[in-house]
Structure formats: C-alpha cells, structure tokens
C-alpha cells in the first residue's frame, strides 16, 4: 500500500546518524514512517536483505517495531531479526548485525536522553559493519527526505514480541529472538568469568545501576547469572518506558544514587552504570570516580589481563575532546594513537581497517573491535577482569596508573538548554577570535595553538572540518569548546578542560581546583556566564 505525503520530511539534520526528537514529534501522523521510508529507500541491499531491529525499551519502541516491520515487508526485505519485548542494546545490535551478515540495523533509542510520552525518541541507522551509519549514508538519507512524496507499508496485524518465534508478513520472515543471548556469548569469549567470580565472591561486593533502561536484563544475566553476585546487585534492572522518570545517563548528576553509594558509603567496592541504550558506562570505586578518559587509558594499559586482548593492541583512538591520558599509554606500548572528531562513527573506519583495537570518548564511551559501537557492559567486565587479576581496589589501580604515566586532570562543563541564538553567537565570536590567541598568554601560559579541529581520515582520505574549538597551551593544558549535536532543547555548550601533571607531581588534587585558572579564563574570554546568564554549568563531570 502506498501512503501519499502532502509535504516532504524536513526534520532530519544532515550529518547525524539518525533522527532524535521528542516522543510527541514522533507521534505526529506519518512522521516515523517518512524517516523510515527514506532509510529503506537508501540503505543498500534492502530488497532480499536481512535487517536487525530493536531498541532500548522506551515509550514508542514496540509500536515503531510494528510499523517498521510492515514497511520492511513492503520494501522487499527478506528477513527482519527483532527481539523479545523489542529489547536490544546498541552494542548487542551491532554484534547481531555483524554475526547475522545483515545489511544493517535500525535501533530505536534516544540513547541517554529521557524517555516516555514527554521524553525523547530516536531512530538510529547502523550499516553492515555494525557501526553508526557513515556520513555518506546519512547524507543520502537526508536528501531522500527532502523530496519524499509517499511511503510503502503493508496492512498487517501486530507480530507478537512476547516470546521467541518465527512469523511472516507477506513474503518477509520475522524472527523474534532473545536479544540478550548472543551478546552474553560474545562476552564469554572475551572475558574469564571464573576468575572474576572468584575475586568478587571473595569479599569484593559490586553494584550495577541499569537506570531502568536496556542493560537491566543483560546485566542480570551476566552479573547475577554468570558471575553469581547476589540478586539485587543489578538495581533498576527492568527496562521501563519512561525509565522510571529518571534520566538514563550514567554520570555523577543523573546516576547520583549510585554515586552516593560509592562515594559516600562503605558497602560496595565497585559500582557501575550504563545509559539508556547500553553503550555508555560509568565506573566507580569506593570513594573514587573514574574519569572516562582515564578509564580508556587504564583499559589500554592492562589488556594483558583480559583473554580477548592477550595479543595486545594494534592501536588506539580517542575523540579529540577526550584527554590525552591514553596517548601516553599508547606511546609506552609503542602503538599508534589517533585523534578523531566526536562521535563513534569515526572509529569505524579505523576498526574496519584494523588500525586500532581500543577506542573511547570522554562522554563515558569505551569500546573495541568486538563490535562497532561503544559498549557499556563490556567496559564494566573489562574493569572487573583487571581488578580480579590485580586483586586491588579501583582507587589503588588509579594510583598505580598515575604514578606510572602521570595524571591528566580533566573535567567537562556542560551548559544545557541555552537559547540557540545565544549559543551560536558565543561560539562564532570565539571562533573568529581564536587566531589572535596564538602566542598570547592564557591562564598564565602561552597559547601554542588555537583552531577549529579538522580531521583527515587515514583510511578513506575524507576531511571533516569544524569539529570543535581548541586552545592548546605550552604546558600541554587544553581548553576545548563544542556545541552538542545530540541535545533536543535549545543548544548545549560543552567545555572540556585538561591539565597534565607528571608522575613526580601532586597526583591527589581535586580536578576542579587544578583546573580553576583555565575555568576562570575561558569564562572571561568567551563571556560564557555573561552571555548565557548561567552563573555555573548545568552538569560538571
Ligand atoms: C554526545 C557525546 C559524544 C557521543 C554522542 C553520542 O554528543 O559528547 O561523545 O558520541 O553524545 O553518544 P554531543 O551531544 O556532545 O554532540
Ligand atoms: Zn547511548
């Protein structure tokens, strides 16, 4: 059946690997359908291909699955693999696409944004390598949306997502699988669960917060099932459509209950949380928060503890705003390190070309060549494996790491929901001023470089410009500014601050104190509080 549209679809931004909008917007007639039509017209191999479909369980997830199934059948897809209750984490989807030789996947999630009728919804497209759609594909989808005049859909009753089963819609097969199982098997290939089990059960109590989002069932099977930690170790472990009203973003602000347990309590030695769709992670020890940039460096320095990485690393990559902590480890290991723009899709080419094994972002994302997405629970298991082998606490491990490699004091300050025009003006003014900064003094140091970061992809030769304003100082300190590409209300300004202290220096200071001169100077220089009217950031990490 063809449904005619009265106007083309104009809501997708070019260059983004999907569509993330409020649930209300998604409920408008033909809204979801229009975007899905553009995907199905653009993705290569749709006719006769296999598609993976699932999401993080938020409001709209199950309904979108039914709509997409009927549209996929109308477009001649041979088979759609979807999951019980529509539950499929982003890393598990990535793995499934790869293991099932699918043409790609559609993941229904707005990641760490809140969910429910008043929250956000999203449709993400992954390619055949299991990673977020590359810009060439999303730009093609974007151009398709601009001239869309109709979509194809088949009239069919809903498919049951309650149990594992096989169904047909017209000529298309629908396989409803357990979305957890394959992922658990993959983790068992990479980690030594018996060793983790021995360590944890020998008086190393842990706690995991799934924030009422997708990782609950995965964590229960991995931690409470395979590792055998007590029931209840996984908190908020049932995926809820509105995430229980909480914001499923594992940081000190939104996962504060967990943070309180670890930072102020004595009950647990290790705590972790993941985000809405399971690709982010936060790691905590007793009285100790692990900065995500440091987490990446610690993983890179300790791969010999993990069976799946015992052969070492080909190379590592980090996003530009991520601290240079992992670069120091890469240098020590004598392997290449790459600096990419923000966003996981840039790691995909490097992983596919086998130039890197590990990669990560400061925004609580770490991953490896086992999938083509960041992977929250994988990072949690990686940490547990290192701690099990070293038989030490998180704080001890961090101490050992810094006294060997030095410490990159680091913080990110977010100013959320700023009026878009104010944010744009602030940012463009600073961009214009940057060239004049080089050679002058900033927070008492000389500015050695000030630019808008651009990336030259070593695999396909493409160049991606304007990826964030950088101010580099002669002692290795940095301030980076970016406007978020994932916020849905107004604009979000992110400021990333970094200062390196040698192994012989004072490694036990508070990051906000060490960074205070940089914080003051950038506020004055970019007129942040003055222009936004916000005296301090909304979120400090
Ligand atoms: C944010 C993070 C970025 C991450 C993205 C998707 O994007 O900063 O590192 O890749 O979410 O999880 P931003 O809102 O900064 O554009
Ligand atoms: Zn996410």
Image (spheres, rainbow, N blue to C red):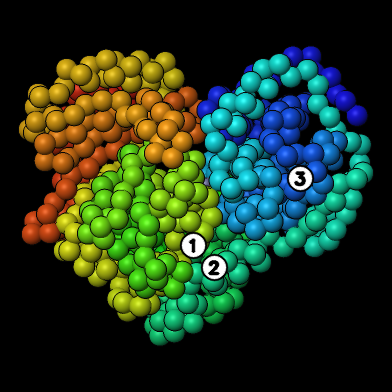
Pick whichever of labels 2 and 3 is earlier in the sequence.
Answer: 3
Pick whichever of labels 1 and 2 is earlier in the sequence.
Answer: 2
Quadrant of the image containing the N terminus? top right
Residue 413: x %, y % from top left? 31, 38
Residue 51 relative to residue 458: left or right: right
Residue 421 relative to residue 141: left or right: left
Identify the residue at horizontal 81%, vertical 62% (top origin): 163
Task: Give the residue pinned by disc 2.
Answer: 187
Mark 2 C-beta closer than 8 Å to ligand 2: no
- 314 or 252: nearer the viewer: 314
Q: Is residue 189 above or below residue 495?
A: below
Do the residues bearing badges 1 and 2 touch, measured as CB atoms within 8 Å?
Answer: yes
Do the residues bearing badges 1 and 3 touch, measured as CB atoms within 8 Å?
Answer: no
Residue 119: x %, y % from top left? 60, 37
Residue 408 relative to residue 302: left or right: left
Task: Give the residue pinned by disc 3.
Answer: 49
Mark count: 3
Mark 1 C-beta closer than 8 Å to ligand 2: no
Pick whichever of labels 1 and 3 is earlier in the sequence.
Answer: 3
On residue 378, the disc is 1
Name the element at disc 1: helix
Q: How far, Cα to Cα, is label 1 from label 2?
A: 7 Å
Identify the residue at horizontal 55%, vertical 24% (top origin): 14
């Amino acid at each position: 059946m063809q449904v005619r549209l009265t106007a083309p679809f104009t809501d997708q931004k070019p260059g983004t690997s999907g569509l993330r909008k409020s649930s209300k917007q998604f409920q408008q007639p033909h809204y979801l359908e229009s975007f899905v039509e553009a995907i199905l017209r653009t993705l290569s191999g749709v006719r006769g291909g296999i598609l993976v479909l699932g999401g993080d369980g938020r409001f709209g997830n199950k309904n979108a699955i039914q709509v997409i199934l009927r549209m996929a059948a109308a477009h001649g897809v041979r088979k759609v693999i979807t999951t019980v209750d529509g539950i499929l984490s982003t890393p598990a989807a990535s793995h499934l696409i790869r293991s099932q030789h699918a043409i790609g996947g559609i993941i229904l999630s707005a990641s760490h944004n809140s969910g429910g009728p008043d929250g956000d919804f999203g449709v993400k497209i992954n390619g055949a390598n299991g990673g977020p759609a590359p810009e060439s594909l999303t730009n093609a989808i974007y151009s398709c949306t601009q001239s869309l005049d109709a979509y194809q859909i088949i009239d069919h009753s809903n498919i049951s997502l309650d149990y594992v089963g096989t169904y047909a819609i017209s000529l298309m097969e629908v396989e409803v699988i357990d979305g957890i199982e394959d992922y658990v098997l993959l983790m068992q290939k990479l980690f030594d669960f018996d060793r983790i089990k021995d360590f944890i059960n020998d008086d190393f109590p842990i706690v995991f917060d799934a924030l009422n989002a997708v990782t609950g069932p995965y964590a229960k099977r991995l931690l409470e099932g395979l590792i055998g930690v007590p029931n209840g170790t996984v908190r908020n472990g049932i995926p809820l459509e509105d995430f229980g009203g909480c914001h499923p973003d594992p940081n000190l602000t939104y996962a504060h209950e967990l943070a309180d347990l670890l930072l102020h309590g004595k009950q647990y030695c290790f705590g972790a949380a993941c985000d809405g769709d399971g690709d982010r992670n936060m790691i905590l020890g007793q009285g100790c928060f692990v900065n995500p940039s440091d987490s990446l460096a610690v993983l890179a320095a300790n791969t010999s503890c993990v069976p799946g990485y015992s052969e070492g690393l080909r190379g590592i990559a980090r996003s530009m705003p991520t601290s240079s902590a992992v670069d120091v480890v890469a240098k020590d290991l004598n392997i290449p390190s790459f600096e990419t723009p923000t966003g996981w899709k840039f790691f995909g080419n490097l992983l596919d070309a086998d130039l890197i094994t590990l990669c990560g972002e400061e925004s609580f994302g770490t991953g490896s060549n086992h999938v083509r997405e960041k992977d929250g629970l994988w990072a949690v298991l990686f940490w547990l494996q290192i701690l099990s082998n070293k038989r030490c606490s998180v704080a001890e491990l961090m101490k050992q790491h810094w006294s060997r490699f030095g410490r990159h004091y680091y913080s990110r300050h977010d100013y959320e929901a700023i009026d878009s025009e104010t944010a744009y003006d602030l940012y463009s003014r600073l961009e214009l001023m940057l060239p004049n900064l080089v050679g002058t003094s900033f927070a008492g140091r000389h500015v050695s470089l000030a630019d808008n970061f651009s990336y030259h992809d070593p695999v396909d030769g493409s160049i991606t410009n304007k990826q964030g304003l950088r101010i580099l100082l002669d002692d290795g300190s940095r301030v980076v500014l970016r406007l978020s590409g994932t916020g849905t209300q107004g604009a979000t300004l992110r400021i990333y601050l970094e200062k390196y202290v040698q192994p012989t220096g004072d490694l036990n200071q508070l990051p906000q104190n060490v960074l205070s001169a940089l914080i003051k100077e950038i506020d004055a220089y970019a007129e942040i509080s003055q222009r936004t009217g916000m005296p301090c950031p909304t979120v400090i990490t």
